[in-house]
Amino acid sequence: MREAVTALLVEPDPGSTVTGLVLDQLDRHPSHSLFLRRGTTGWTGVTARQFALEATALAKGLIAGGVSAGDPVAVLAVTGYHRTLVEFAVWFAGGVTVPMDPDVPAAQLTYVLQDSDVRRIFTQDAAISRQVAGVLRSAELPAERIISTVRMDYDGDAPNLASLAAAGAGVSDAELERHRSTATSADTASILYSANPNSAGSNSAASSAFVPSGCRITHGNLVLPARNLAPLLPDVPHEERPRVLVLLPAPARCPHLSHWRFWQPESPWRTAVLPGWKRTYRRSGHCSWLSVRTAWMPSITKRPGRR
């Protein structure tokens, strides 16, 4: 096995959190687009100011609904703008995200709900909401566990993102900041659960027998790669219209993984690795298995104190 380790270009800041990345952009480049969204009329930019306003409005709704520091909130959606928006809203409210694939088998979803103590679930659309409702009816959850579901759109009947933002109208900016600032770089930002690679999206007996493992991802785990990316690629942030296209396979679509796996065809191309990251190469058939892992990130293990 061949390994390569690079040194950090930016040292970790104990007070850094994921929401600080957005606030930094809001302070320095409020009118610059952080995201591009594709709609019926083409691509539309979302500025730092607009994204911060949307995320904090939803965060205030979460706070009004009782979300406190460290509370886990599940997000069942594919990668996209609304998933990113909701996850940042949870972080602004001081919560912890539990991202899952919307096609997660019912048995695995039930296990994650029981293991992570989730009290609120964001679903991609009405169809996923109905599936989750069925799982909640059949799941053996304590009677005091009341789990609310919010649909990730602004149209149709409540509860959805529009009604959530409206519910937080009475929450002050000072209260929002109190919730946001409770987290430090050492605090948990997300809890990731492993997926069954042999039966994704299946409710078969084999899939039902699979027991996911949970992994805590801290704010520092997410912030440090972002802080080191700028000096690693100095030309990209300063281009007139910088664009970054990220192509990752299904297991790595979530932006906060402690263990990224890339299946790549054999080629002479080189893969850039962030400072502080360790590379491991294995051969399997006609593909190379590239495992990229940071020395400061935890391994995928069971959460302490859990089953």
Image (spheres, helix red, strand yellow):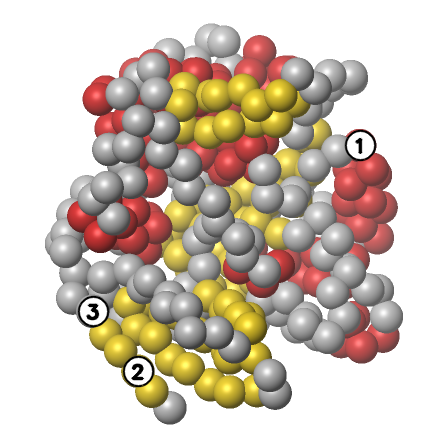
Give the CA separation, mark 1 to mark 2. 46 Å
Tag 2: Cα neighbours inside 10 Å, few (<14), some, or many (≥20)?
few
Tag 1: Cα neighbours inside 10 Å, few (<14), some, or many (≥20)?
some
Tag 3: Cα neighbours inside 10 Å, few (<14), some, or many (≥20)?
some
Give the side of residue 250 with respect to residue 258, left or right.
Answer: right
Q: Which one is in front in this view, the residue at disc 3 or the one at disc 1? A: 3
Q: Position of residue 209 (x, y in %)?
A: 76, 76
Of the numbered discs in the image, which one, if any, rests on residue 6?
3
Q: Which residue is mark 1?
A: 126
Residue closest to the far top: 170
Residue plotted at (57% across, 11% down): 166
Give the CA separation, mark 3 to mark 1. 45 Å
Earlier along the polypeptide chain: callout 3 or callout 1? 3
Question: Is 300 drawn above or below residue 63 in the view shown?
Answer: below
SS class, disc 3? loop
Question: Is 194 drawn above or below residue 217 in the view shown?
Answer: below
Of the numbered discs in the image, which one, if any, rests on residue 3?
2
Residue 184 shows in the view = no
Residue plotted at (47% across, 45% down): 245
Image mark count: 3
Q: Which one is in front in this view, the residue at disc 1 or the one at disc 2? A: 2
Of the numbered discs in the image, which one, if any, rests on residue 160?
none
**Residue 174, picture quadrant:** top left
Residue plotted at (23% across, 61% down): 275
